[in-house]
Amino acid sequence: MKLLELRAVSAAYGAVQALDGLSLEVEEGEIVTLLGANGAGKSTTLRTISGLMRPTEGEILFAGASIAGLPPEEVVRRGIAHVPEGRRVFPGLTVRENILLGASNRRASRRELARDAEEMFEIFPDLRRFADTLGWMLSGGQQQMVALARGLMARPRLLLLDEPSLGLAPLIVQQVFRTIAAIRVRGTTVLLVEQNAHMALGIADRAYVLETGRLVVKGKPAELWNNAEVRAAYLGGRELIEEAR
């Protein structure tokens, strides 16, 4: 089932064209990754889907209904959660309080929220011992787990993840990507923006490569890896490919 569809979507920051007629789709149950250099329009794509930015042209359909131009709180209510770049953990709140903020779109009892928060600690067991610790005291990797848990507290059908590996040590990056794969197994569809093409394609079902707001290539991970021109131009060059083998 087609869960998300962008049809010829354009968006701009003033006079700067950030997206230029972008079309893509995400099937329910998939992990789809957006790849490309800085400034390619990847984060803008997520911001336009989640309502943080209004498209200037085109359609955005979620579960068959248009969401283009809806405010972010309505987009969340429809079933889309956005975990932005930089984790955005509130330093003055505890880990548990940060996680609970993710359910602000839901009308739920305290008992139900407490049960859901406990489920987050089962998914992210490393966070349990920090439940009552202030967010600023956690490592970058732990803060990323808090951000993921907070997004899942909205019970989204679609989770938008923006650069989840940014600034993390390699071993922590591997843990984060294992968690993303597990999130899909739980039934949540994922649209992932990621600079680490090797890791992203390792868990993705399909990928789109963007350049200056336009789609330049799409396909399954194996198809992209096997295309020498695509590898050299968009996926980190030949050295990365040899390392991945």
Image (spheres, helix red, strand yellow):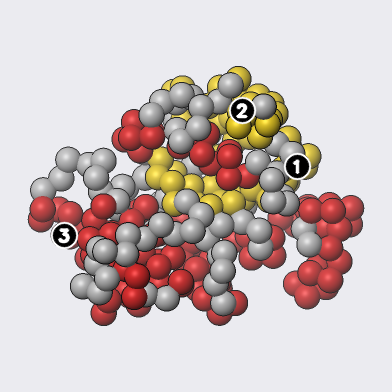
Residue drawn at (78%, 75%) of the image = 243
Could you tell me residue 193's position as x and y percent?
59, 51
| Viewer-proximal residue among 189 and 160 | 160
Helix, strand or loop at mark 1:
strand
User: Which mark lies nearer to you, 1 or 2?
Assistant: 2
Which residue type carries mark 3? Ala
Residue 32 visible at all? no
Query: Which residue, given by chain and number where applicable, does mark 1 sit on?
Result: 211
- The residue labelled by disc 2 is 14
* Amino acid type for the residue under numbered disc 2: Gly
Quarter of the C terminus within the rendering: bottom right
The extreme front residue here reads 14
Which label number is shown at residue 1? Answer: none
- Distance between the Cα atoms at labels 1 and 2? 19 Å
Q: Distance between the residues labelled 3 and 2?
A: 43 Å
Please tell me which of labels 3 and 2 falls first in the chain: 2
Mark 2 residue element: loop
Real-space CA distance between mark 1 and mark 3, rounded to the nearest whole angstrom: 43 Å
Q: Which tag is nearer the camera, tag 3 or tag 2?
A: 2
**Residue ID at (84%, 71%):** 239
Counting residues from the start of the chain, the first of labels 1 and 3 encountered is 3
Local secondary structure at mark 3: helix
Percent position of residue 60, x then y:
53, 27
Residue corresponding to mark 3: 114
